[in-house]
Image (tube, rainbow, N blue to C red):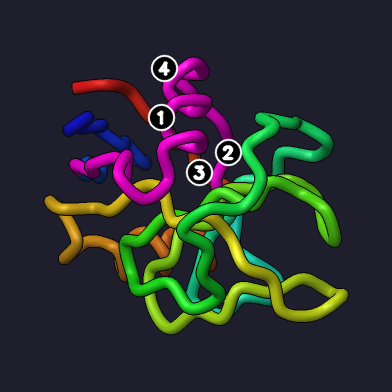
Amino acid sequence: MTVLKIRIASFEFTAYMEEEYAPRTCAQFRTLLPYSQKLIQARWSGESCWIPLGDLSLDVGFENATSYPAPGEILFYPGGYSETEILFPYGATRFASKLGQLAGNHFLTIIEGREHLQDVGHLVLWHGAQDILFEEE
């Protein structure tokens, strides 16, 4: 089981890769590690942050896809109806874009630090974009 550390501002999370259910997404994401970006408030998906990735293609298709991730179930959307993105749910979420409901690949699950998900969501919502770093433990 591959374990990642995720750092956002002063918060640290531990997540495992869903390699059994999203093997292509996990394998491709590992090639990007360590990966840093900006985390911003989602516009259409409720209590979620997101990382817009534009036209980045990991060529993974859909696997283990869901529209209703639980807090801490991180999704990778491979593009299509909307731009490629990573969704970081911190509360009630229905993954969507301006074109309607989407489904993304659930490829990471936070297993430590879940109690701080709402804190991160409120930080991003009220104080703007935050640096996020994914790295192998």
Assess disc 1: are there few (<14), some (14-19) or many (≥20) residues with their C-alpha within 10 Å of its C-alpha. some
Whether 12 is drawn above or below 42: the answer is above
> Looking at the image, is mark 4 or mark 3 nearer the viewer?
4
Q: Secondary structure at mark 3?
A: strand
Q: Residue at x 49, y 16 (%)?
A: 31
Which badge, 4 or 3, comes first in the chain's sequence? 4
Mark yes or no: residue 127 visible.
no
Residue receiving disc 3: 130
Which badge, 3 or 2, comes first in the chain's sequence? 2
Mark yes or no: residue 101 visible.
yes
Dot 3 and dot 1 residues touching (CB under 8 Å): no
> Looking at the image, is mark 3 or mark 1 nearer the viewer?
1
Residue receiving disc 2: 38
Q: Nearer the viewer, residue 54 or 18?
A: 18
Dot 1 and dot 4 residues touching (CB under 8 Å): yes
Q: Is residue 69 left or right of residue 82?
A: left
CA separation in Å, label 4 and label 3 = 17 Å
- Whole-percent x, y for residue 30 in the image: 42, 22
The quarter holding residue 9 reads top left
Residue type of the residue flagged with mark 4: Pro
Q: Residue at x 22, y 29 (%)?
A: 2
- Which numbered circle lies on residue 34? 4
Start-end of magenta stretch: 14-39
Residue type of the residue flagged with mark 2: Lys
CA separation in Å, label 2 and label 1 = 9 Å
